[in-house]
Amino acid sequence: MTTLHAVTHGHASAALPVRDIGASDLKAALRAGFDDFLAMPTHVVFISLIYPIIGIVLAALTFDGNLIPLLFPLASGFALVGPFAAVGLYELSRRREAGLDTSWAYAFSGLRRRAVGSLVAVGGLLATIFACWLVVAEGLYWALYDSYAPATFLGFFHEVLTTQRGWALILLGNLAGFAFSLITLAVSVVSVPLIVGRHVDALTALETSIAAFRQNPRTLLAWGFIVAGMLVLGSLPLFVGLAVVMPVLGHATWHLYGRIVAD
């Protein structure tokens, strides 16, 4: 970590000062996140069980023929609300750093009314991005397939991989998904842990997160690809792997925030 930057715009910015970071900071954050997971496995798994459960439910819903095309958008878009869903993990990491009790019962105890309001605002924004992604994904499918509803998941899988319109769906869907992921990364990379750690307002949290992304675009893009890769690996065995991947990423995000935002 090197130069300290206070990011300003044409108006008085609410953003807090942010630091330059590099690949070594990403590695350190991941190591610290894994260390937190090992130090608090029972509590973390208890909290993170919601992720594979929700994932399995979403997968089950898509076996209705009309919903099968939304399997990938739902599974990939689930990561868009991940930063908000990891609030309890950020608090546990904060308590461990401070030498406090890290029992799961304290996962949300440090939040004050102002922080709760800010979290609701940022969570609402992330939920809106998620909803917009689903609308765009559904629109792309209808533009290419009209009202075609696959009878089975395997049939749909074969159709997508062996036809020109299926290839078009993959290309356009991934481009759209990347755009939504980029927006989510910019607004959430430090905003939620910043609210948990310092109880700032939503505007300050969002502007600081965007400032951090503007200051470290390559490094944080690399972080985004790391997160995406780990989520894919965690999703492969019917989302069960998310019970490990999500808490590790949640704790790591807390430590990454600490390396980006100045004291």
Image (cartoon, rainbow, N blue to C red):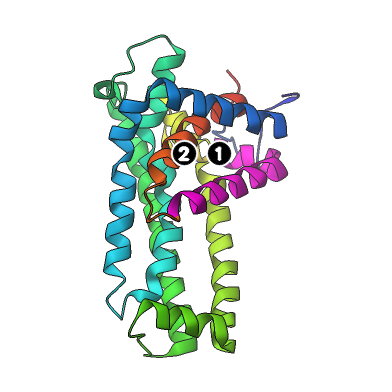
Residue drawn at x 27%, y 76% is: 64
Q: Residue furthest top?
A: 99
Q: Amino acid at mark 1?
A: Ser
Can the viewer see residue 16 in this picture? no
The residue that mark 2 highlights is 203
Give the image quarter of residue 104: top left
Q: Residue furthest left?
A: 105
Residues in magenta, as a range = 208-235
Residue at (49, 85) in percent of width and height? 159
Nearest the camera: 205 or 53?
53
Is residue 150 magenta-colored?
no
Q: Amino acid at mark 2?
A: Leu
Q: Is residue 258 above or below residue 139?
A: above
Q: Residues within 10 Å of mark 1 (few under 14, many from 20)?
A: many
Name the residue nearer the viewer: 158 or 184. Answer: 158
**Residue at image mark 1:** 209
Q: Residue at 43% across / 81% down in the picture?
A: 156
Q: Percent from the top left, x then y, of residue 186?
A: 57, 46
Residue drawn at the location 54% of the way across and 83% of the way down: 166
Return the residue nearer the eye: 219 or 196.
219
Question: As drawn, is 11 to the left or to the right of 69?
Answer: right
Say which element carries label 2.
helix
Query: Does residue 230 show up magenta in the picture?
Result: yes
